[in-house]
Image (spheres, grey):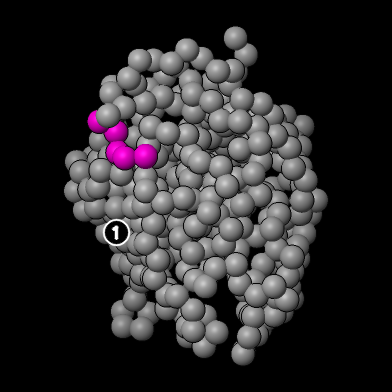
Amino acid sequence: MRDGAATPKIPGVLQQRTLRSISHAVGVGLHSGQRVELTLRPAPPDTGIVFRRVDLPEPVEIPMEAEFVTDTRLASTVSNGNAKVQTVEHIMSACAGLGIDNLYIDITADEVPILDGSASSFVFLLQSAGIVQQKAPRRFIRVTRPVEVREGEGANLKWARLEPYHGFKLVFEIDFAHRVVSSTGQRVEFDLGRDSYSRDIARARTFGFTKEVEYMRSKGLALGGGMDNAIVVDDTKVLNSGGLRYDDEFVKHKMLDAMGDLYIIGKPLLAAYTAFRSGHALNNKLLRELLAHRDAYEVVTFDRESDAPEGFAEVARAW
C-alpha cells in the first residue's frame, strides 16, 4: 500500500493522519523575495512533519522538533546544521489546525512561500489533497503541570504559559503602542475542539508598519512583502483596499503564529496556552522549558475515541 493511502480503521483508537495525495504550490519568500516551489507529500505513520530541501545537491531533511529552531527574530527558522528553512509557522499552524501528524514538505529554497500572508492557502492545499487516517495511534504531548516563561518588566513585560487541559485551548492578548492596532480586538480565545480553525483563525494575515517595512527593505528583508500578502499600516490607517478580514485580525494572526510555533514540538499538545505579547522567540522558549521538565508532560494515546477531547476524533471541517 502506498504512503498516505487510506488504511483500515483501528476500532475505537484515535488514529494518526496524513494526506491522501500530493499537493503543490509556487510563491515567493516574504523576506528573500525568492521564487520557491512547495510540494506536500503523504508520509508514513510516526514520521512527523519533515521539511526536505530538495534544491540542494543532496536533499536534506529537517524534522519539526523544538531544538531545531535556530532563529526567531522575524519568523521561526529551523535548521539541522546542514540546511535551514525560514518562516515555517504559517504552514505549521495549518497542520496544527487540521490535525496533520505526518507530512513531507519538499521545498526548493530556504524560505516557505508567504502566499497570501495567512494560513488559508495552506489549509486549502492540505484539504485539497485529502486527509486520511493511518493505522497507528495518534500521540499527544499532555501537559501535566503549569509551565511559564516571562521576559521584561512593566511596559515591556511579555509572558506565555502552558497549563493542563483536556484539549487544546489558546488565549492570546496583544498590546501595541499604535492607535490603528489598538482600535481593534486585543484579546482572542480559541478552542481547537470546539471552534473552526479554517473559519476563525486561518485567514488572519501577517502585518507590518510602513516605517518598519522601509527599514527592513533597506536591510535586504521583506523583499517579497506587499499588500497582496500582508496587512500594511501607516500612522493612521490600514492601507489595504479591502481593509481587515476580521475585526480582530491582528491578534488572530498572533494566535495563528503561536499555533504554528507550538506545533514545532512534533506532536499535538493537550494544554491550555495563555500568552501576553508573546512571539516566536518566547513561544519556542516555552516549548524548551516544557521539555526540560520531564514531570511537566507525558506522551499519551487514546484507545477509545470517546476518551479523547471533544472534537478531536473528527477530521477538521472544510470551509
Examine the structure image and report whether residue 108 is included in the region drawn in magenta: no
Residue neighbourhood size for the residue with mark 1, other residues' Cα within 10 Å, grouped as few (<14), some (14–19), many (≥20): many
Left or right, residue 173 beside residue 133: left
Q: Secondary structure at mark 1?
A: strand
Q: Which residue is mark 1?
A: 161
Residue 289 visible? The answer is: no
The N terminus lies in quadrant: top right
Residue at the image point whose x is 60% and y is 67% from the top: 245
| Residue range (magenta) | 307-311
Q: Nearer the viewer, residue 217 or 88?
A: 88
Q: Quadrant of the rendered structure where residue 263 is? A: top left
What residue lies at 25% left-to-right and 35% top-to-bottom? 298
Where does residue 95 sit, x and y in percent of width and height?
52, 42
Q: Residue at x 19, y 48 (%)?
A: 145
The one nearer the camera, 58 or 121, is 121
In percent of width and height, residue 274 lies at 32, 61
